[in-house]
Every structure is written in structure tokens, then in C-alpha cells.
Amino acid sequence: MALAFVRTVERGLTDRLLSDFASHLQARGCSLAGVVQTNSDRPGSHHCDMDVRVLPAGPVIRINQVLGEESRGCRLNPVALEEAVALVETGLERSPGLLIINKFGKHEAEGRGFRPLIAEALARGIPILLGVNALNQQAFEEFSDGYAEELASYLEGRIWWFE
């Protein structure tokens, strides 16, 4: 089983690492499925907009909801997330060389979101690279049952794991 993850503490760094890695692999002709995330500052707000690009070539889906400046709850739009999941599921039919998922987040920790696709890819022998944050680390460890490998945040370490 080839399941690996990256974990960083700097806001947005995991997203940039996974996006850069996807671009590097695509430039080398690797077949990919999954999503990578881009965070964009929203003028006049301390919140950002979160967009995922469905691999290999789009579309880009905004996955956040604008709940207001004082909001403290989860801003993830579950309908947009499920739209992305459905598109990635279609991409798995091509038997890609790698599945990249931007984050094993709250929905995945609760058994929803990309979690069923991650399990399907594992069953089919498709390698998976994803981001994990501290909040969902324990749920991910329970899901992966100790089989996941944490990768270094530098590009060469991710290339070495994949090749």
C-alpha cells in the first residue's frame, strides 16, 4: 500500500507543496487524479477564499462559503466538496499514477468527503498523497492504521517516495 502524507504548520504551505508537486509530475507526463487547493486573500477580510483544482486539468471549484466576518464555524461548502469528490471519482476510472488529495479534513475524519475514494484507490493499488493537519491527525492515523508514511516537505523527498 502506498499512502503518504505531508503535514506543515505554516498556513497554506501544505496546499502549495501539493500543488507544486502535482505541477512537477504533470510536467513529467504523470497521470494524476485528485484535487489541489489554492487560497486567495479576500480584500477587506481576514478570511480567504478556498478553491480546489480537479486534477489533471480542472475545473476549479470554490469550496468555501462566505459566512461573514464574525463567523467562527466551518466555512466549507459541503455541496461544493461533494461536486469535487464526484469529479475525482470519475478521474479514478482512468487508473491514474497518483491520487493527490489536498487535505484529510473534518469530513474525511467523519467518513465522508474524499474518504471513500481514498479507500477505493488503496484497494486498487493507486498511490495516494494527501495533506493532514494536526486537528485531524488522530482520525487519519486510525484510518490508515499505521500504514501511511509521512514525507518531508521538500520536493526531492516527495519525488523519491513517488518514484
Image (cartoon, grey):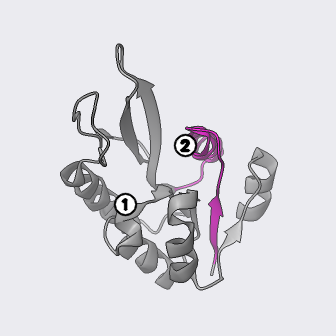
- Furthest-left residue in view? 79
**Residue 16 percent location from the top left of the image:** 59, 38
Query: Which quadrant of the structure image shows residue 6?
Result: bottom right
**Residue 99 percent location from the top left of the image:** 51, 62
Q: In this view, does 56 lie to the left or right of 31?
A: left
Q: In the rendered view of the protein, which quadrant contains the C terminus?
A: bottom right
104 or 129: which is nearer to us? 104
85 or 6: which is nearer to us? 6
Task: Characterize the local packing of mark 2: few (<14), some (14-19) or many (20 or more) Cα atoms within 10 angstroms.
Answer: many
Identify the residue at image location x=64%, y=67%.
Answer: 4
Gap in angstroms between the C-alphas marked 1 and 2: 20 Å
Q: Give amino acid for label 1.
A: Gly
Identify the residue at image location x=37%, y=37%.
Answer: 51
Residue 163 visible (yes or no): no
Q: Which region shows up in magenta? A: 2-31
Badge 2 is on which residue? 15
